[in-house]
């Protein structure tokens, strides 16, 4: 750290400080009392360890202690590494050059402040933490005799533990926070307490960390603003048809099925990164499903209902609005899982069964969509009998899963970026979060109907029945992904923590129709929402789909920039000539109900 001169150090106003602290004390007391009252009202037995973490760590500890010699050897190894660290630190203090014993992983932004490297004390704190953290995780991973599920759970929560203890998360061991405290006379800490209380009050006693300025965005005002109209609705969804931006359009319209875990406008954030706007500019007639934010009245809505009242009714509405029977369909994440399931159903059903003729689904595009859940990645940590039963018990009382529950789960997959960075910024530095459209969308969560979510977790994640022929029955019809003949475009993301790309790749080996697989750089959201104008990232293609995904990547060709133009070249061949006069909402049999983005998307989970 740089030395502070007297004029750089700001002394706090004692009167203002006392006033602020009195207000904080009053608000804190009320929050604590409210929290204790709610805890007393809960049933104690069912929620003691809903994540089933205790048993996993008990099993791990028992196995570890069964080989004390190996543990002693590991401790000696850590001691030797500490001796090396003391040695190089002493060299630096005497003005000598020395190489670090351990360095942060690439992309670790916790230690980006220059003092972590330039100041010998903070460099020692940083390296000491990294040595210990990696040693702890290595010991956990090397314990023998545990089943795969326990190993995964212990490894995941150990990482959560060591991430929480990072020196960057504490006042006295974060040089940036210390500087801010001296320069502001502690005003940053007072502001941080205010921010903490604001988040606790917003979460009604639960900490809901603000990731963005919630007042900076308004759906339909400065996000989700691509012009269009709601042309159809039922109790589960509204269907939006977007205004054309070209004089002529492709013959075959496009229907997008977003996930109902989140709101659709991830595909229509702002003009510069809106996939919807870009697709209309290519001459596609675009329709998007906007799912309802369900409450207890829709508790019994099932996966089948989302297929029939969502996909099938939306398809019928598109044909009425355009006069075309053929439709191209995109399914994103859970929407893609449902699309694959629905296509398998359509190819297996009898003509009199509900649903369109599969021949009229001219193509299917899958964005980061899971069908084989054996490679579910870190999300598998949250899927076991104990956790699902506890979740079902909670959903049975409410009728739905709180939107914040899913948001917390996803944030834990990238805790340093999506939790601890905001703890430092909001509570230690006392800053307001930056207005960021993507994080506003991420905080605008949706609920899950109890019946649907239980089916999804058990039959797909826990039992992995979707990949089995006849493993799942929809509308009385056993389905088989191997019967899908629809030409498919599959887009996955290389760093996806939610739908790991090797798990999504499995569909290339099952679908009977032609499959073009494309792998984008980055993750579940940034890998998909990557407009050509950004010039960011890259993607890979391969004309062959071998059984092993690693072999696919090894022989794939890398392309710079966005994959969007690659997809358009593919979809254009499935869409007919670009000679049809542009279709405006209301031109067909369906009359506009309201302006886009509609009313369903505006309903908040809280």
Image (tube, rainbow, N blue to C red):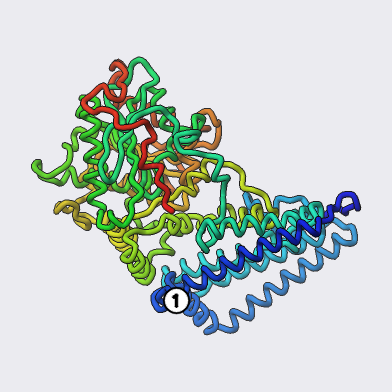
Report the residue at 87% width, 53% height from top: 4
Residue closest to the eye, 304 or 252: 304
Residue closest to the eye, 162 or 188: 188
Q: Which residue is mark 1?
A: 48
In the image, residue 259 above or below residue 240: below
Report the residue at 45% width, 56% height from top: 404
Residue closest to the eye, 95 or 12: 12
Q: Quadrant of residue 71?
A: bottom right
Secondary structure state at the residue bearing disc 1: loop
Report the residue at 30% width, 34% height from top: 255
Residue 565 image position (x, y, % from top left):
43, 28
Which quarter of the figure is the N terminus placed in? bottom right
Report the residue at 56% width, 40% height from top: 216
Residue 313 appears in view: yes
- Left or right, 273 with reference to 471: right
Residue 474 image position (x, y, % from top left):
19, 52
In the image, residue 150 above or below residue 95: below
Which quarter of the figure is the C terminus placed in? bottom left
In the image, residue 37 above or below residue 460: below
Q: Quadrant of residue 393?
A: bottom left
Residue 539 image position (x, y, % from top left):
48, 37
Residue closest to the eye, 49 or 80: 49
Residue 26 image position (x, y, % from top left):
63, 65
Residue 116 appears in view: no
């Amino acid at each position: 750290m740089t030395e502070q001169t007297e004029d750089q150090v700001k002394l706090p106003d004692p009167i203002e400080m006392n006033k602020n602290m009195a207000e904080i004390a009053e608000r804190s007391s009320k929050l604590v009392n409210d929290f204790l009252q709610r805890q007393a009202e809960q049933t104690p037995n069912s929620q003691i360890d809903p994540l089933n973490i205790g048993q996993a760590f008990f099993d791990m500890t028992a196995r570890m202690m069964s080989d004390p010699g190996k543990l002693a050897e590991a401790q000696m190894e850590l001691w030797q590494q500490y001796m090396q660290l003391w040695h190089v630190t002493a060299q630096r203090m005497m003005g000598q050059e020395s190489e670090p014993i351990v360095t942060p992983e690439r992309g670790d932004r916790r230690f980006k402040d220059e003092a972590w490297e330039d100041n010998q004390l903070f460099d020692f704190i940083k390296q000491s933490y990294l040595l210990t953290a990696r040693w702890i995780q290595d010991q956990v991973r090397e314990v023998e005799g545990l089943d795969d599920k326990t190993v995964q759970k212990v490894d995941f929560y150990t990482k959560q533990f060591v991430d929480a203890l990072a020196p960057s998360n504490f006042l006295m061991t974060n040089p940036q926070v210390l500087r801010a405290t001296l320069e502001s006379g502690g005003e940053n800490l007072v502001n941080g307490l205010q921010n903490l209380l604001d988040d606790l009050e917003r979460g009604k006693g639960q900490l809901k960390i603000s990731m963005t300025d919630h007042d900076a965005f308004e759906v339909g005002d400065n996000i989700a603003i691509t012009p269009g109209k709601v042309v159809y609705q039922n109790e589960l969804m509204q269907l939006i048809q977007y205004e054309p931006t070209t004089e002529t359009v492709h013959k075959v319209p496009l229907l997008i099925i977003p996930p109902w875990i989140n709101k659709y406008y991830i595909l229509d954030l702002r003009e510069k990164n809106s996939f919807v706007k870009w697709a209309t500019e290519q001459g596609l007639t675009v329709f998007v499903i906007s799912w309802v934010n369900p409450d207890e009245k829709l508790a019994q809505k099932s996966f089948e209902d989302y297929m029939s009242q969502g996909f099938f009714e939306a398809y019928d509405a598109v044909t009425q609005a355009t006069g075309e029977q053929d439709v191209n369909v995109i399914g994103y994440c859970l929407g893609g899982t449902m699309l694959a399931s629905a296509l398998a159903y359509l190819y297996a059903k009898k003509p009199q069964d509900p649903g369109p003729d599969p021949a009229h689904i001219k193509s299917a595009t899958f964005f980061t969509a899971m069908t084989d859940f054996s490679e579910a990645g870190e999300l598998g940590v949250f899927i076991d009998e104990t956790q699902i039963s506890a979740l079902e018990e909670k959903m049975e009382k409410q009728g739905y899963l709180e939107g914040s529950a899913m948001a917390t789960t996803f944030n834990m997959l990238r805790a340093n970026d999506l939790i601890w960075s905001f703890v430092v910024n909001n509570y230690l530095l006392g800053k307001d979060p930056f207005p960021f459209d993507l994080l506003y969308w991420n905080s605008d969560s949706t609920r899950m109907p109890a019946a649907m979510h239980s089916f999804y977790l058990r039959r797909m994640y826990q039992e992995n029945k979707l990949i089995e022929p006849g493993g799942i029955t929809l509308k009385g019809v056993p389905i088989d992904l191997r019967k899908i003949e629809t030409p498919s475009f599959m887009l996955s993301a290389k760093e996806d923590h939610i739908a790991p790309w090797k798990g999504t790749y499995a569909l290339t080996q099952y679908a009977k129709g032609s499959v073009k697989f494309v792998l984008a750089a980055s993750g579940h959201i940034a890998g998909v929402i990557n407009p050509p104008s950004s010039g960011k990232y890259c993607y890979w293609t391969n004309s062959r789909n071998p059984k092993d995904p690693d072999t696919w990547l090894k022989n794939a060709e890398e392309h710079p920039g966005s994959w969007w133009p690659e997809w358009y070249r593919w979809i254009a061949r499935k869409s007919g000539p670009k000679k049809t006069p542009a279709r405006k909402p209301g031109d067909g049999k369906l009359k506009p109900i309201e302006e886009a983005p509609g009313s369903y998307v505006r309903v908040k989970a809280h």
